[in-house]
Amino acid sequence: MLALLFLPAIREFLYDWSHDDNYSHGFLIPVISAYLLWLKREEIRSANRESNLLGLFVLIAGLVLNILGTAAAEWYTVRFSLIPVLLGAVLYLWGWQVVRHVWFPIVFIIFAIPLPYTLFRTLTFPLQLFSTEMTHAIVTSAGVPALRQGNLLHLPGYSLEVIEACSGLRSMIVLSALAALFAYISPGGAFRKLFLFALAVPIAIAANIIRLLVTSLGALFISHEFAEGFLHDFSGVLVFMVGLTSFLLVHWLLEKVRPTNRLLRATPG
């Protein structure tokens, strides 16, 4: 019944993941969720199961969202309704003990849902301007003459246009998913996990600025073809590596400042 209900949404998922580079990572999200559930299989199997009526209300709320989204042709609402429907069904059928083990793999699906187009455009333009401005500030502080005009950065013999794809929003979406997964599997309390997740936005912005700097300097000191060819194709991997390295570094620093596993002092006698 779930498959039939969400079949149109699943088709839209597959279409967007295949045709929108901003969400090409969407194919990985269900696989990661399924793998996390498989890792929790023993805890799920041994958890106490008892029906909870609250889950029925959550399930109904998710179904209402699905109906309203379908009536308004608002695909984000339709696809988002999958999350409360799944959570509500699990809570109603098996209770809180099972929900405690499966909530993250279910909620993680949100990173595969494309943002509404208007919201995406609203967030993109300020990020374009900010990334251009910061790249301009760093380049000029290094002694390279540059002129900024909106989202255009003019260097000696080369002009870099920070288009929508270079705004950093795509990096923010991907690194937010990575941060959520990293925070979930890392040891520590809720505050540490929330802190790691909150780092996704500044790390994504910094990684995108580094990408623009590398592209600008590559065009300036090597060649335009090198910057627009190899560096452009390699930029996605660069952003991912910068993000992953940053998360690992922050986690290492947190462990140095406040270790999660402290040795208990031996008591005399």
Image (tube, rainbow, N blue to C red):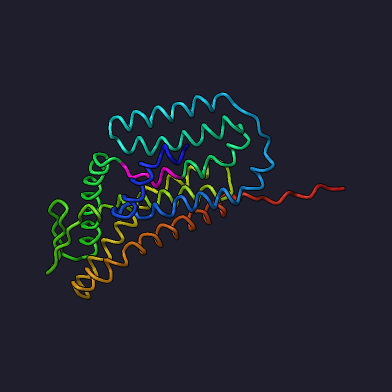
Residue 259 lies in the magenta-colored region:
no
Of 131 and 227, nearer the camera is 227
Residue 63 lies, in percent from the top left, at: 42, 29
Describe residue 76's horizontal placement relative to residue 163 as left or right: right
Query: Which quarter of the picture shows residue 28?
Result: bottom left
Residue 242 lies, in percent from the top left, at: 39, 60
The extreme right residue here reads: 269
Describe residue 231's horizontal placement relative to residue 52 as left or right: left
Residue 98 lies, in percent from the top left, at: 61, 37
Residue 114 lies in the magenta-colored region:
yes
Describe residue 237's horizontal placement relative to residue 146 as left or right: right
Of 79 and 228, nearer the camera is 79
Residue at 59 percent across and 26 percent down: it is 52
In the rendered image of this protein, does residue 203 appear above or below residue 9? below
Q: Which residues are magenta?
A: 109-115
Residue 35 lies, in percent from the top left, at: 54, 53
In the rendered image of this protein, does residue 39 appear above or below residue 50? below
Residue at 24 percent across and 57 percent down: it is 135
Of 11 and 26, nearer the camera is 11
Query: Which quarter of the picture shows residue 126?
Result: top left
Total numbered circles: 0
